[in-house]
Amino acid sequence: MDILYILWLRQIKRYLRSRARLIGSLGQPLLFLFAFGFGFGPLYAKAGGGNYMQFLAPGVICMAILFTSVFMGIEIIWDRQFGFLKETLVAPVSRMQIMLGRTLGGATVATLQGVIVFLIALLAGFRPEHWYSAALALPVMFLIALLFTAFGTGIASVMSDFHGFQLVMNFLVMPLFFLSGALFPLNDLSPALATLVRIDPLTYGVDALRGAFLDTAHLGMGLDFSVLSLITVLCLVVGSHLFSKIEV
Amino acid sequence: MAAIIRVEGITKKFHDFTAVDHVSFEVEKGEIFAFLGPNGAGKTTTIKMLTTLLHPTSGTIEINGHNPVTEQNEVRKSFGIVFQDPSVDDELMAWENMEIHGILYGVPKKLRRERIDQLLEIVELTDRRRNLLKEFSGGMKRRLEIARGLLHHPKILFLDEPTIGLDPQTRNHLWAYVEKLNKEEGITVFLTTHYMEEADRVADTIAVIDHGKIIERGTSQTLKERTKTENLEAAFLALTGHAIREEQVSGIDHLRMRHRLWHR
């Protein structure tokens, strides 16, 4: 327990101390929220979709969580390059504990980031259906964060340096975001796009978060939670397996 | 005296390249033992095998009575290590790096706090305990790593080229600490270096290693006597047929280097 706690705490401390990273990572969600939210708002309303800010905000919160958590996972490459990873790998603790501790820490940071974007969305005019929706939204956000931190950890475990980072961003993270229905509704999609959307795990995260905040889950909360939990467990298992194979 | 490290005929192959070739040696409890050899001789690979990070292709190792392949945790608890490259978290404070180490090694809280204070005092970093490590110089980081490696009361301290990149004054200081720790805490020290003068100065026993094989071992004195040379540098030349830092790199060395880069 102590070990999980100290590795968790390490991630939190690093996050809170690096203001530049904290503020920098809010730039993109802010841009999406304001430029997309207000830019497409009138068009969306005219098409009969209602208030676009209401629709978009959960998607952008998910985006912030996705980017932060993948990044938190990939940070292992830093630890490897700067050597701290060796210190943990040569300690008398199991790799599983190390992986779990830092994944929980990364997921907590990503959830915090999501909460910050939620607060900004409130300023931009987003209004959850009920005041108690936050109680349901928080576990959803944490589940998404856990899934993608474990995913990032797995990827970082098979990458030896930063050269693959751009590849991961452009061919994995960006598609995960754009195909998740964060920006557009899931009804009346072409079959090809609909299939891609249904394969994307983030789709279920975005849908669950809309369900939590607005009672408008398109796929149903039950399905969302099942898929998210299942893939999270899968990512944790595969991620810790790949992590246990790291050689220094 | 009893041996705390026993190595019998270990070999490590990376594909068809043999980095360590049938190496055997023993390190007595309480001694300072140096692996002396040029870059690429197999020093770091040996340390990695001794410290559970790599498994030997063949041969057996015993560290403090335990086998690093089958009893990883027992072995890990019995040594502290300072790696060739820094292994601290730059974004944390000095004491936080120590604290994490203490918890990873299961040192109880009260003892941990006492020991951290005491060790920071020894390496003269007490007034820097709340500084972030990115504000530390290379030498200060090294000192902190040594203190950290000792936090869990290890029986053996491994130092892999601990003075690389440090200025002569800091090097001097560092060896003074190591000698002091060896005397006062009775810790066995296993170090690798390619600096003759360092091996000559601190080590009780020196093993000369080249191309993955131990060529000769003994005290600095016996090495000189056996090769009938005046200093360790000449002794090394007599033993290996080349100086430790050759200006000209041989074709074989090039191949070795290429191999290393490709099969990392």
Image (spheres, coloured by chain):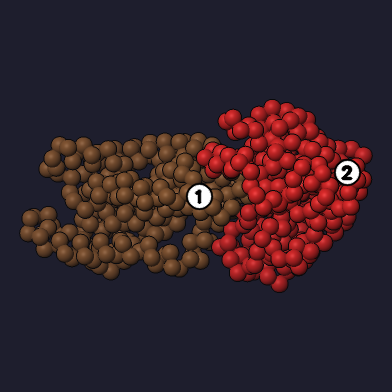
Provide the residue designation for mark 1. A76
Residue at left 18%, top 65%? A38
Tag count in the figure? 2
Between disc 1 and disc 2, the foreground one is 2
Residue B86 pos. (x, y %): 63, 56
Lateral position of residue B243 relative to residue A115, left or right: right
Observer able to see residue A174: yes
User: For residue A248, which quarter of the picture?
Assistant: top right
Lateral position of residue B192 relative to residue B84, left or right: right
Q: Can marks 1 and 2 be said to lie on one chain?
A: no
Distance, label 1 to label 2, CA atoms, is 49 Å
Residue A213 pos. (x, y %): 28, 54
User: For residue B79, which quarter of the picture?
Assistant: top right
Q: Amino acid at mark 2?
A: Thr
* Viewer-nearest residue: A60 or B262: B262
Indicate the secondary structure of the residue bearing disc 1.
helix
Chain for numbered disc 1: A
Q: Amino acid at mark 1?
A: Ile
Provide the residue designation for mark 2. B227
Query: Which chain gets the red colouring?
Result: B
